[in-house]
Each structure stands twice: as structure tokens, then as C-alpha cells.
Amino acid sequence: ATGVKAGELIKRLMKETNQLYGNNSPVEFDTAAMIAVDNNIELVIKRQKTAEEELIEEFEQMMENVDPEKLRPRPPVVTIMGHVDHGKTSLLDKIRKSNVAAGEVGGITQVIRAWSVTHKVLNPDDPNEELLEKQITFLDTPGHEAFTKMRARGANVTDIAVIVVAATDGVMPQTEEAVNHAKAADVRIIVAINKVDAPNANVERTKRQLYNLNLLPDNMGGDIQFVETSALTGQGIDDLLTAISLEAEFNLADELKADPDRPAFGTCLEGYMTAGEGVNATVLVQQGTLRPGDIVLCGANYGRVRTMYNDHGVAIEEAGPSTPVRITGLGGVPNADDPFYAVDELTTAAKIAEAREKKDREASLNRFQAVKDLDSLTAA
Ligand code: GDP
Ligand code: MG
């Protein structure tokens, strides 16, 4: 038993999708997965795959086949999560600003909601020598829904979740949700207790509430790093970056690897149109190296990469693993969480794009069918 009542489930489905559902309505996998995750339900899918699904799966498996011998270290990808108004955006802004090299002309041109920062840390082998430069990739909080959708597809774009909790409010419902999502996604968690500068901040109470969510620091038998921050004063920002680098080095060294010398693949973070450049897609390269001129399939859209921009809006020629870039040149606007692949032939891209389109069409037909089912129920 799931412990979820059927009526509740239908209500939730309608809320999540703005669609009507009857008792026999098919439910899209992503939606089912999201509700299952929120309710700790194991999802069992028993359905014959269509020819298109088989084709897509075969293609993706082939494209994602990475040679373990060729793996090299890559930067961690970090997502900041937490209750609304607890300071996620402010923390990210502060990290970004403190990272802009002094004297950089024009400051930051923030064009995409994902960026790389360089953090200097002491070299433990030689503390008197030059600082080591560590790259960290931050994704602007994609929201729980996007996070869950990506996870349902098996595409974890995030390695580390920073859970932000304001010491003024303490743990709130969305804090708890964020923790559950991060745990379910099996990503490493770092806690940032924010707003410690505020007169009504209560750090001790906030910590106790977090311990109750089973987030325990090492002096309590756990392995979660706690950092106290203020996005207002900048206190603790460097500690947070250090915590991320430590996490990457000591707990994720095996996972943070990719092969830069292969055709690129990764995940679309957002897609949109602009008057000047047409279709834009922000993508995170997860394996391989992406270059202008590459033929790219992204969800059900494809094309040749015309221009590729880094997080400062500068046109670049190469993007390796863990690099977020904005590309132009796709034939249509892709969705957030669409996988992308650099392929050899336009015909391959066209074939898989067509299969995806057909699959998407069938999914929306199913939704239409769901509405009809409910109509016939109410008519009876
Ligand atoms: P988000 O919804 O989590 O992205 O939160 P925001 O970054 O938008 O912050 C919400 C509000 O809290 C804003 O008015 C911020 O100025 C304020 N705020 C964020 N961080 C701090 C902090 O460290 N100290 C104080 N005093 N206020 C903060
Ligand atoms: Mg925000």
C-alpha cells in the first residue's frame, strides 16, 4: 500500500498538470515519478515499449557509452535549494560577484542561469606555494519539479545540493522538501545556515531542526558539512566554496570524472527564442567537448551549433565536461531537461528527432484521452 488515497492522487495530478484525470487515465511517466518521489512510492512500470522508444533508448545507450579508461577529473555541479526567501538568489549573486576578477571591465554579464566559478584553495601538499584553482559549476535553482523530472529520467545533472536555511525562520516546509529531494536523488548535501547577520537569527535552534531531519555534522556521527553564511555581509561565502571543494575532493572523487575527448552529450537547462539569434539553448556539457559546427540533437530538435557562449556571454570554441554554455543553431526550442547529443550525421539527428516527436505526440494524445475518459464518467 502506498498510503496515498486515490482521490488525493487525482487531485494532485490535476494540480500538477492542469489536466483532468479519470480512474483509467494514463499518467505520464514524469508526473507519476514526481508524485511517487514526493510520497516515497516505488514506481513499477510494466508496459510494452513502442518502436520509437526502443530506437531512442538504443541510441542513447550507444551515445552514452563512455570508456572508463579515458575518464579525467571534472568540476562538481552544484544546485542551491531551500525555502523561498531564505536567500538562495542572494547567495548565488554574492558568490558570483566575489568571483569576478578585480578590474574586469564591465563586471558580469549574466546571460545564462548557470555559471562556473574559480575558487582558490591552499595546496595541502605545499601550503606555502601557489593556491590551487578549483572550478565549481553552479546551476540556478531549477525548482523541485525540474529537479525531480531530471532525476526521473536518470539524468542527475547535480552532484551537490546546498540546502539554504535562514537562521531567522529556521526549517520550513520547502526546506524539508528540498532535503527529501536531495536525499532521493542521492546527491551530497551541504547545509548553509544563512542570514546569520540578522538580529533575530537563531543559529542553534536552526541547527537542532536540521538534526531532526537527520542531517548530522561529523561531531554528531554524521558527515554533513554545516556552513554559516550571510549573503548580505559576505560572511562564510568562502567557507561555503571551501566546503564544496572538500566535498568534491573527499566524497565525490570517483564520480566527478568525464571523458573530454569524445562527442559531447549532456542536458538542456533551458530553451528560448530571441529576436536576434532565433533558438537559444542553455546546455550543460556532461561528457565530451562541444564545439561550434557540431551537429546536435536536443530533445526533438536538432541543428548545427552556430555560436557557443560561455557564462559571461563570450563566444567560445570549446566546452568540456561540467561547462554550461548557451548555443544557437537548433531548429526548434528544446525543453529544460531534454538530453542533447553531438552526432556525426544530420540524418541520425533527424531520425531520432522524429522518433522523439512521435513519442511526444503519443503522450499528448494520452492526455487528450484522459480528458475524454473523465467526460464519459461524468456523463454516465
Ligand atoms: P530566495 O527566494 O531564496 O532566492 O531568497 P532571496 O535571495 O531572494 O532573499 C530573500 C530576501 O532575504 C531578500 O530581501 C534578501 O535581501 C534577504 N536576504 C538574503 N540573504 C540574506 C542574509 O544573509 N542576511 C539578511 N539579513 N538578509 C538576507
Ligand atoms: Mg530566488
Image (spheres, rainbow, N blue to C red):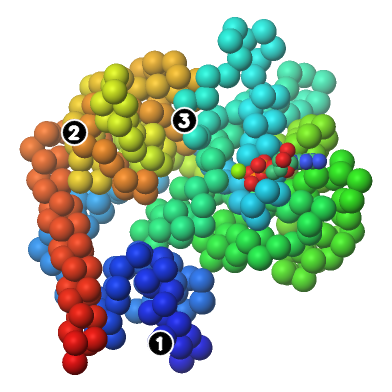
In x, y percent, where is residue 353? 15, 46
Say whether disc 1 or disc 3 marks the residue closer to the N-terminus. Answer: 1
**Which one is nearer the viewer's eye here, 36 or 18?**
18
Q: Is residue 172 left or right of residue 142?
A: right
Q: Residue at x 55, y 63 (%)?
A: 181
Disc 3 Cβ-to-ligand 2 distance below 8 Å: no
Residue on which the image places disc 1: 6
Q: Amino acid at mark 3?
A: Ile
Q: Amino acid at mark 2?
A: Gly
Residue on which the image places disc 2: 331
Residue on which the image places disc 3: 112
Count the labels in the image: 3
| Secondary element at image label 3 | loop
Q: Amino acid at mark 1?
A: Ala
Q: Measured along the vertical axis of the image, is residue 242 above or below residue 172? A: above
In x, y percent, where is residue 176? 65, 65
Q: Find the residue positioned furthest to the front.
A: 379
Q: Measured along the vertical axis of the image, is residue 200 above or below residue 235? A: below
